[in-house]
Amino acid sequence: MKIITNDIAVSSEQIANQVKDLLAEKPDAVLGVSFGRDLIPVYQKLKELGQAGELPFGDVRVFVCCEY
């Protein structure tokens, strides 16, 4: 799926929903995340979904990707 928009709120919501769909299919998914400011709105949406009980993070493995 391609997400083409200039609206960070729209794209963040779409990306968070893609992660939600992934975790519904594969609760033990491995997520590679980047640090930095660019993805903060996405992480905020994921946090909101997690706090609402809509994301099962219990079996998820996460690693940080460094671009430097």
Image (cartoon, rainbow, N blue to C red):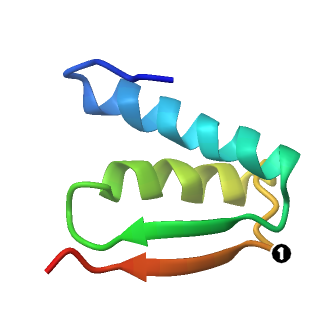
**Which residue does the image show at 66% across and 49% down from the upper left?**
49
**Which residue does the image show at 85% across and 60% down from the upper left?**
27
Quadrant in which the C terminus is drawn: bottom left
Q: Where is residue 11 in the image (x, y as percent from the top left)?
A: 38, 30
User: In the image, 56: left or right of 45?
Assistant: right
Q: Where is residue 18 in the image (x, y as percent from the top left)?
A: 61, 37
User: In the image, 22: left or right of 11?
Assistant: right
Q: In which quarter of the image is residue 29?
A: bottom right
Q: Position of residue 52 (x, y in %)?
A: 74, 51
Q: In which quarter of the image is residue 55?
A: bottom right
Assess disc 1: are there few (<14), some (14-19) or many (≥20) residues with their C-alpha within 10 Å of its C-alpha: few
Q: Where is residue 50 in the image (x, y as percent from the top left)?
A: 69, 58
**Which residue does the image show at 62% across and 35% down from the upper left?**
17
**Which residue does the image show at 45% across and 58% down from the upper left?**
43
**Viewer-nearest residue: 31 or 6:** 31
Q: Relative to 53, is 15 above or below?
A: above
Amino acid bearing label 1 = Asp
Q: Which residue lies furthest to the top in this view?
A: 5
**Viewer-nearest residue: 13 or 25:** 25
For mark 1, give the secondary structure.
Answer: loop
Q: Residue furthest left?
A: 68
Q: Relative to 19, is 21 above or below?
A: above
Q: Relative to 8, is 66 above or below?
A: below
User: In the image, 38: left or right of 10?
Assistant: left
User: In the image, 29: left or right of 17?
Assistant: right
Query: Mark 1 = which residue?
Result: 59
